Every structure is written in structure tokens, then in C-alpha cells.
């Protein structure tokens, strides 16, 4: 497990008190299942990790549908609820009229 220093807060209690520590991972909910993700992970990072092509899915984070252009910018946070919906093609010609 990695530990990163986020910030120093000087409360006047000495040199070590006031350091805030962040763990290197967080919990998210992905399609209804708990999953550990690295701090700083974006939606784009998650799709790459899952080997999912971004042009073949719709992604919702906390009930907000993201545009494909937001995948690389949208960072995930502790407790985020992510739904990834795949596009599926199919059907026969007899169904298309």
C-alpha cells in the first residue's frame, strides 16, 4: 500500500502533527460491485484497465452520463458509483422493416 502526503496544516502543535496522509487506493462501486481503484484514476484509466474501448460504451458516474470527451478528465473519488453500459448490435434483417 502506498502512502502520499496531501498537505501540511500548521495547527501549532509541533512539526509532525497536522500532516494529512492519503492512502494510495479508494473504494468505488462498478456496475454494482465493490472495487479498489488507485487514487487519481480517471474514467479513461478505468476503461483501459478493464480493456474496454471507450467508443463502445456509455459511462455514468453518480447518475451523471458522461460525454466520451470527459472520460480522460473525469477523476474518480472514494465511493463513486460507476455504471458502464456496452453497446450491442444485432438483429436479423427480418426485424428491420
Image (spheres, grey):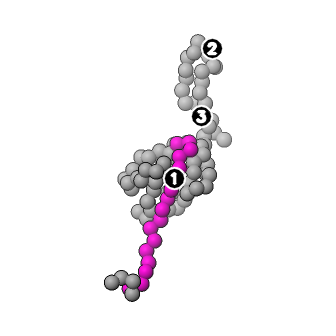
Please say whether residue 80 is one of the residues in the magenta stretch: yes
- Mark 1, residues whose alpha carbon is within 10 Å: few (<14), some, or many (≥20)? many
Which residue was labeled with disc 2? Answer: 14
Q: Quadrant of residue 79?
A: top right
Judged from the image, the secondary structure of the residue bearing numbered disc 1 is strand
Which residue was labeled with disc 3? Answer: 22
Residue 37 visible in the snapshot: no
Residue at image location 39% in from the left, 83% down from the top: 95
Q: Residue furthest right?
A: 1
Between disc 2 and disc 3, whose residue precedes? Answer: 2
Nearer the viewer's eye, disc 2 or disc 1?
1
Question: How far apart are the alpha carbons under marks 2 and 3?
Answer: 20 Å
Between disc 1 and disc 3, whose residue precedes? Answer: 3
Q: Nearer the viewer, residue 5 or 71?
A: 71
Residue 90 against residue 33 in the figure, above or below = below
Residue 92 visible in the snapshot: yes
Answer with left or right where residue 51 lies relative to residue 25: left
Residue at image location 50% in from the left, 56% down from the top: 83
Residue at image location 43% in from the left, 80% down from the top: 91
Please say whether residue 37 is one of the residues in the magenta stretch: no
Between disc 2 and disc 1, whose residue precedes? Answer: 2
Question: How far apart are the alpha carbons under marks 1 and 3?
Answer: 22 Å
Check residue 82 in the rendering and tell me which mark sits there, or answer none.
1
Q: Position of residue 90 (x, y in %)?
A: 44, 78
Q: Position of residue 42 (x, y in %)?
A: 48, 48
Please report the bounds of the magenta region as a residue range: 77-93
Judged from the image, the secondary structure of the residue bearing numbered disc 2 is loop
Amino acid at each position: 500500500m502506498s502512502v502520499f502526503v496531501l498537505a501540511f496544516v500548521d495547527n501549532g502543535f509541533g512539526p509532525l502533527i497536522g500532516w494529512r496522509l492519503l492512502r494510495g487506493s479508494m473504494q468505488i462501486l462498478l456496475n454494482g460491485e465493490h472495487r479498489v481503484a488507485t487514487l487519481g484514476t480517471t474514467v479513461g484509466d478505468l476503461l483501459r484497465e478493464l480493456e474496454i474501448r471507450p467508443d463502445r460504451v456509455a459511462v455514468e458516474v453518480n447518475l451523471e452520463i458522461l460525454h466520451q470527451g470527459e472520460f480522460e478528465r473525469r477523476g474518480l473519488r472514494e465511493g463513486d458509483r460507476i455504471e458502464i453500459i456496452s453497446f450491442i448490435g444485432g438483429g436479423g434483417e427480418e426485424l428491420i422493416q
